[in-house]
Amino acid sequence: MTAVLPSSYTVRPPSKEDAQAFLELVSDYNTSVIGYADFTLEDAEDELTEPGFEPETDGWLVFDGDRLIGYGAVFGKGDHRSLDLDNVTADPVVERWLLDRVVDRAAEFAREYGHASVQLDGVVYQADTARRDRFAGYGFAPGTTFHRMRIDHDGPVAAPSVPDGITVRRGAPDEAGQRAGHAVLNGSFDGQFGFTPRSFEEWRASQENFSAFDWSQLTLLELDGEVVAMRSTTNQFVEDENCGYIGRLGVLEKARGKGLAKFLLRDQFALDAAAGRTGTILHVDTNNPTPALGVYLSVGMQAVLVMEVWRREVTAA
C-alpha cells in the first residue's frame, strides 16, 4: 500500500543550508531511542554534500509548515549494486512515504547501471523495536549486526612495539600513499557485507569531502617494501564523546596472523590517549568473515551500542 502525505505537508530536495534543521531532526529521534544525539552538525553537512549524491533526485525533506518532520535519501557508490538509505522521522506515515521514494529511486539506479536488481540497506538501532517491525513490514529482512566498540583511556597508554619486519608510514600526503591505502582497503574488505569497491578517484573525493578526516590520519604498514595493512581514523567522535575513531582497519590476507591488526589498534589507543581523548571507538560487523570481533575484544574493547542493517532487494524499474 502506497503511503499518502497529508495535503498540508510540503516536500523539497535537501541542501547544505538545511544541515541545522537536519541535525535537530536526527538528534531528536536518536535521543528518543538511545538517549543522546549521536550526530553533529559536521555529520549533517557531510551527508548532504557527499560526492555522487544528487539532492534533486536522491533526497527528500518533508515539512509540516516550517517544521522539518522527515528526511529520506539514497546513496550509491561504485557500480551501484549496493545502495544505502537514510530515513529519519517520528511519523510512520512519513517514514513509509519516504521509503517508497527511496525504493523507486533504487529501482531507477538498477536500470541506469544495468543491474537486474540492487541491494538496498538501511541501519536501525536495535533498541528501536517498533521501527525494526515496520521495516520487516516494508519488505526488508535482517542483513547483519554492527557493534559499536569502545575502549576507555584513563591515562597514558603505552605504545606497542612495531612487529618485526614492519615499517610504519604515518600520513599519506602524496597520491602514491593514498593509492596504496586504497588498494589495501579494497583488497582486505572484498566480500564483506555491504562493501562496494570504489575507484581511487571516487574514494579520494569522498575522503576529502569528509570534514573529520585529513590525510595525516591514514597509517600504512609496509612489509618487504609492500603496503599490506592500513588504518584510517577520523575526528567524528571528538566533538560529542572526545573519542578517537577508527573508520577502517584492513590487513591483506597474505599478511594476516602477524599481529598487524592488534598493533594498529594498540597504536591508535596510545595516540588517542596522548591527545587527551577519553577513549577510542570503532564499528564491527559481527558476521565479518575475518575474526575481527574477537580481535577487538582481545585488546579490551567492549560493545556499547548495537545497530542492525536491514536489506531489501529492489528490481530494476
Image (cartoon, grey):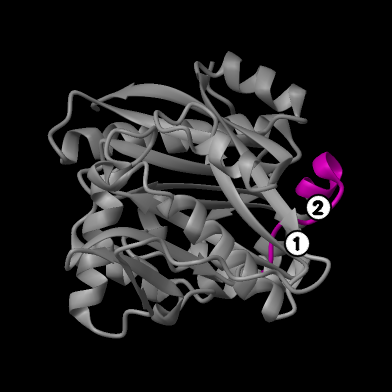
Q: Residue at x 26, y 72 (%)?
A: 178
Residue at which label 2 appears: 28
Note whether 261 is above or below 217 in the view shown: above
Is residue 181 in sight in this rendering? yes
Residue drawn at (18%, 77%) of the image:
176
Q: Nearer the viewer, residue 243 or 119?
A: 243
Contact between marks 2 and 1 (CB within 8 A): the answer is yes
Residue found at the very far bottom of the displayed protein? 173
Seen from the viewer's position, the closer of residues 193 and 248 is 248
Q: Position of residue 208 (x, y in %)?
A: 38, 76
Separation (CA) of disc 2 from disc 1: 6 Å
How packed mark 2 is, by other alpha carbons closer than 10 Å (few <14, some 14-19, many 20 or more), is some
Asked whether, in this view, residue 176 is left or right of residue 279, the answer is: left
Q: Position of residue 101 (x, y in %)?
A: 46, 37
Whether residue 107 is situated above or below residue 186 in the rendered picture: above
Image quadrant holding the N terminus, namely top right
Q: The residue under label 2 is which amino acid type?
A: Asp
Question: Where is the C terminus found, in terms of image quarters?
Answer: top left
Q: Magenta includes 37?
A: yes
| Res 24 label | 1
Which residues fall within the magenta stretch? Answer: 29-40
